[in-house]
């Protein structure tokens, strides 16, 4: 189940300040440059976790995020 597709603009939303990625990525916006699949949903029980979204930020940094950390860009 895909929430976003390549080319979509997204905002990273990591509200947990203890998350190691919070300070680096929270509230940044980027573009989905790839959609990857794995079997994380087998561990979590949520099939949405089987999808990783590769996001490219304005500075060229790329990072992979799950659906729960992404929102449509404003």
Image: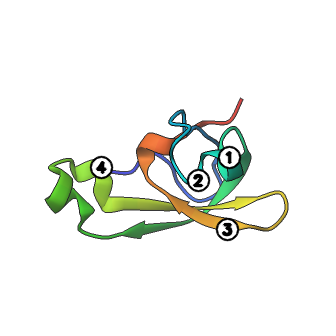
The residue identified by callout 2 is 21
- Judge whether 32 appears above or below 23 on screen: below
Label 1 vs 4, first from the N-terminus: 1
Q: CA distance from mark 1 to mark 4?
A: 25 Å
Nearest-to-viewer mark from 1 and 4: 1
Residue pointed to by mark 1: 23
State which tag comes first along the sequence, 1 or 3: 1
Up-down relation of residue 62 to residue 74 (above or below): below
Which quadrant would the C terminus be assigned to in this image?
top right
Q: Mark 4: give few (<14), some (14-19) or many (20+) Cα within 10 Å.
A: some
| Element class at badge 2 | loop
**Disc with the residue nearer the chain's start (2 vs 4):** 2
Q: Is residue 65 rendered to the left or right of residue 61?
A: left
Q: Which residue shows up at 43% across the image and 69% down it? A: 36
State yes or no: discs 1 and 3 in contact (Cβ < 8 Å). no
The reply, left or right, for residue 49 in relation to residue 23 is left
Q: Please give left or right for residue 57 compared with residue 5 in the image.
A: right
Q: CA distance from mark 1 to mark 3?
A: 16 Å
* Secondary element at image label 1: helix
Mark 1 Cα within 10 Å, few/some/many (few <14, many 20+)? few
Which of discs 1 and 3 lies nearer the camera? The answer is 1
Q: CA distance from mark 1 to mark 2?
A: 6 Å
Helix, strand or loop status at disc 4: helix
Q: Nearer the viewer, mark 2 or mark 4?
A: 2
| Residue shown at 67% from the left, 49% from the top | 25
Q: Are the two marked residues, 4 and 3, in contact with CB atoms closer than 8 angstroms?
A: no
Residue 10 in the image, given as x and y percentages of width and height: 64, 43
Q: Nearer the viewer, mark 2 or mark 3?
A: 2
Q: Badge 2: few (under 14), some or many (20 or more) residues near its Cα, within 10 Å?
A: few
User: SS for tag 3?
Assistant: strand
Q: Which residue is mark 3?
A: 62
Q: Earlier in the sequence, mark 4 or mark 3?
A: 4
């Amino acid at each position: 189940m895909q929430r976003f597709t390549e080319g979509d603009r997204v905002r990273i939303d990591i509200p947990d300040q203890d998350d190691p990625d919070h300070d680096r990525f929270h509230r940044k916006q980027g573009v989905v440059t790839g959609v990857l699949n794995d079997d994380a949903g087998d561990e979590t029980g949520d099939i949405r976790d089987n999808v990783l979204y590769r996001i490219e930020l304005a500075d060229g940094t790329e990072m992979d995020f799950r659906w729960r950390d992404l929102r449509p860009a404003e």
